[in-house]
Image (cartoon, coloured by chain):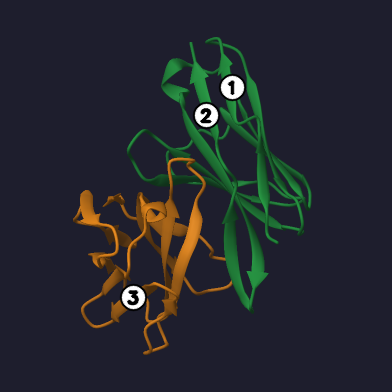
Chain colours: A orange, B green
Amino acid sequence: AQTVTQSQPEMSVQEAETVTLSCTYDTSESNYYLFWYKQPPSRQMILVIRQEAYKQQNATENRFSVNFQKAAKSFSLKISDSQLGDTAMYFCAFRESNFGNEKLTFGTGTRLTIIP
Amino acid sequence: GAVVSQHPSWVICKSGTSVKIECRSLDFQATTMFWYRQFPKQSLMLMATSNEGSKATYEQGVEKDKFLINHASLTLSTLTVTSAHPEDSSFYICSARTRDRGLYEQYFGPGTRLTVT
């Protein structure tokens, strides 16, 4: 079974600074997908960024980028120029790539607070 | 696009009664929907996978007779908590699967807070 570990329960950073959230995972699969989801106080889950394991290039979405280290099974999220609206719970998630097996396994989350 | 709604957003019921939660994909068809449960300050735990026109697949440890799932159309899945008890109080989130730029993605509803008194 796959496991996802987020070792930072809480983090805080000043507005406009850069912050990195850590995630490690364990799997025996060679191809899979990794995600970062944001859950603001509204509780609505929002996809932040996605990484396909077979792609060596790190995914980026505007101010959000990942550092994907497949051999180390590490998948960290970097938020640049942090904004107050980035305050939320962030969940790292894993999904096998096989069609029909779409289950998402979530980490325990990191509560990020952006300080004005 | 890819909007998922849930109804109700918050429900309070008495112990022993049943409550139904609806999950709708508003602008796409979803053959597969998922139901998650989230306890306060915890992560999302998958309860079951709902497939249109067939029986749901439940995760280990989830009582299928207690959490009834019906996926009767391509845009609607329902979760019925039967004979609810206070320990069933939780935040229930659904997601619907669709293709986005060639890849299957899950889009999440806003969640339903269930309080059993």
Q: Are marks 2 and 1 in contact (CB under 8 Å)?
A: yes
Give, as a three-letter code, the residue at label 2: Arg
Residue for badge 1: B11
Give, as a three-letter code, the residue at label 3: Val
* Quadrant housing residue A54: bottom left
Element on which disc 3 rests: strand
Left or right: where A30 falls relative to A61:
left
Measured as percent of width and height from the top left, residue B31 is found at 72, 58
* Quadrant housing residue A26: bottom left
Give me the disc on residue B48: none
Residue at the (53%, 18%) spot, across then down: B84
The chain containing the residue under callout 1 comes to: B
Measured as percent of width and height from the top left, residue A90 is found at 36, 55
Residue for badge 2: B113
Residue for badge 3: A66
Residue at the (77%, 57%) spot, across then down: B27
Measured as percent of width and height from the top left, residue A56 is found at 37, 90
Q: Are marks 3 and 2 in contact (CB under 8 Å)?
A: no
In this rendering, the label closer to the viewer, 1 or 3: 3
Q: Kindly report the distance in space between the C-alpha atoms of the residues bearing marks 3 and 2.
A: 32 Å
* Quadrant housing residue B8: top right
The chain containing the residue under callout 3 comes to: A
The chain containing the residue under callout 2 comes to: B
